[in-house]
Amino acid sequence: MTAPDLRGKVVLLTGCTGDIGATYLRALTAAGADVVAADLADGAEQAEKADADGPGSAVFTRCDITDDSDVDRAVRLAVDRFGGLDAVVNNAAVYKALGHKRPLEELTAQDWDTVLRVNVRGTWQVIRAALPALRARGGGRIVNVASVVTRTGAAGFAHYVASKAAVEGLTRAAARELGRDGIGVNAVSPGLVDDEATRTINDDGYVANAAASRSLPRAMRPDDLVGAVLWLVSDASAFVSGQTVVVDGGGVFV
């Protein structure tokens, strides 16, 4: 399958430094998009490589998605450097920093506040900041990253599961509200990805067990998500909004 042609599209990608975010970044520029890659960690090297590989361009900006000034600066960078903004991929989230699983009664209020502040409020803050630039282009695409755990549950990660369920709800509410502006809002819901973050916070054998339970019984890689994300960013999905696309090898059916 040929990747969508994203030449002329300007994309704001949050959370660009992890295995999944870096994969999104490379795929977007390979499809021709110009990308503002934003992360709290230093993603300059990833952006420089994606920019060099092209054909699209990439520039990195440090960004705390819960800080309005950081988010506004990222949007302004897209407009100033590339002339506008056509799409947002909200990938930034607390995941690796969750640490090992804990029963819900052992989670603290600070645990909950941190995860909900970043995963839900931060996603909303990015959407809110991007709206003027998207409207100035006559519409656009917003892709929020949820998780298949909203359907399966995940013992020990109650705060994370709740946050990703909220992201799906925010996706539907925003889709209903922003469609009048020509802005489509969807979510991609990954299954358990075999990456550095997942291996850090889960016990040995967890990834293998997840792989064995799928209809397509193998480990899921970051690049398995690329097709869905590029499609949701592209004009090919222009009449799709308010949907959650599950990418997990047939582990769950929706």
Image (tube, helix red, strand yellow):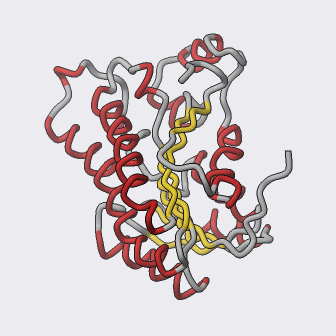
Residue 82 lies left or right of residue 164; in this view the side is right
- The percent coordinates of residue 32 (x first, y second) are 76, 68
Between 118 and 196, the one lying in front of the other is 118
Dividing the picture into quadrants, the one containing residue 163 is top left
Residue visible at 43% across and 39% down? 96
Residue 172 lies, with reference to residue 123, above or below; the image says above
Residue 254 lies left or right of residue 166; in this view the side is right
Dividing the picture into quadrants, the one containing residue 95 is top left
Q: How many marks?
A: 0
Residue visible at 40% across and 79% down? 73
The N terminus sits in image quarter: top right
Between 206 and 68, the one lying in front of the other is 68
Residue 45 lies, with reference to residue 246, above or below; the image says below
Between 89 and 97, the one lying in front of the other is 89
Residue 103 lies left or right of residue 206; in this view the side is left
- The percent coordinates of residue 69 (x first, y second) are 31, 76
Residue 246 lies left or right of residue 54; in this view the side is left
Q: Furthest residue to the left? A: 109
- The percent coordinates of residue 71 (x first, y second) are 37, 71
Q: Furthest residue to the right? A: 1
Between 252 and 16, the one lying in front of the other is 252
Residue visible at 66% across and 29% down? 220
Residue 33, visible in the rendered structure: yes
Q: Furthest residue to the front? A: 180
Residue 159 lies, with reference to residue 155, above or below; the image says below
Residue 53 lies, with reference to residue 176, above or below; the image says below
Dividing the picture into quadrants, the one containing residue 177 is bottom left
Residue 23, visible in the rendered structure: no
- The percent coordinates of residue 252 (x first, y second) are 55, 19
Residue visible at 37% across and 44% down? 167
